[in-house]
Each structure stands twice: as structure tokens, then as C-alpha cells.
Image: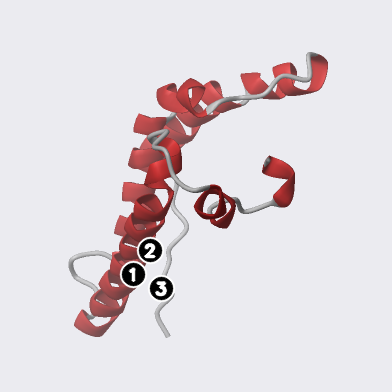
Amino acid sequence: MVAWYVATRDWRAGAVLLGYAAGWLPWFYYALADNRTMYLFYAIAMVPFMILALTMVAGLIIGRADAAPNRRALGAAVVGAFTLLALVNFWWLLPVLAAEVIPHSQWWARMLFRSWA
């Protein structure tokens, strides 16, 4: 039986993780010491590293070019389903993210937790 994943170290994955952590971890201090909130626009520095991380994970899920066709097809289906789910979620939250005027009932439907109000 051939392992589907061979544990190797890749400096590129470490660089992506380090870049993401450098943008995200400092906010733990502000959240704990000053009880501050991190708004979405503060995360803009992390977005390129998040995209790189998602791309690297998608490549791992799809598999190498010499992998079995069935394995690559299944990986592509999983990545495609995740991408479709992310696009549907973005479409659903777009009125809130873009600060559009929507009815209060629609706004409440988009809140995941009642404590977000």
C-alpha cells in the first residue's frame, strides 16, 4: 500500500505560515491586554498569505501530476466543492460586507451567533 501523503518539509509552506502568523498573532495581545476588536479591514495584510495557503492545500488535496486519475478526480471534486461553498457563502454575506441596506430580518438571517448583534 502506498501512502497517499509523504511527510516532507517544504520551506514555502513555512514561509506562508510565518507570513500569516505575523499578521494575525499580534492581535492576540490587543485582544487580551486592551480588549480590542480586530475588524475585517485589519486582516487585509493576511489575505495574500491566506490565499497562498489555500492554494497550497488545494494542490495537496488534488495530488501530484503522476497520481492515479481517480485520486486526482476525487481531489478536484473536493476542491471544487469547497470553492463553490466559499463562493456561495461570499454571495450570502455580500450585503453585510458591502454595507448595503437590507431589511432587519435579512440582516438577522446572516448573523451566525446572536451575540454578534
- Residue name at image x 55 percent, y 57 percent: 109
69 sits to left or right of 100? left
**Mark in front: 1 vs 2:** 2
- Residue name at image x 56 percent, y 25 percent: 39
**Could you say where residue 4 lies in the image, as x and y percent from the top left?**
40, 73
66 sits to left or right of 22? left
**Mark in front: 3 vs 1:** 1
Q: Which residue is mark 1?
A: 81
**Could you say where residue 52 lies in the image, as x and y percent from the top left?**
34, 40
Q: Amino acid at mark 2?
A: Leu
Q: Which residue is mark 3?
A: 4
Q: Quick check: marks 1 and 2 in contact, CB under 8 Å?
A: yes
**Could you say where residue 12 lies in the image, as x and y percent from the top left?**
36, 36
Q: Amino acid at mark 3?
A: Trp
Image quarter of residue 2: bottom left
Q: Which residue is mark 2?
A: 85
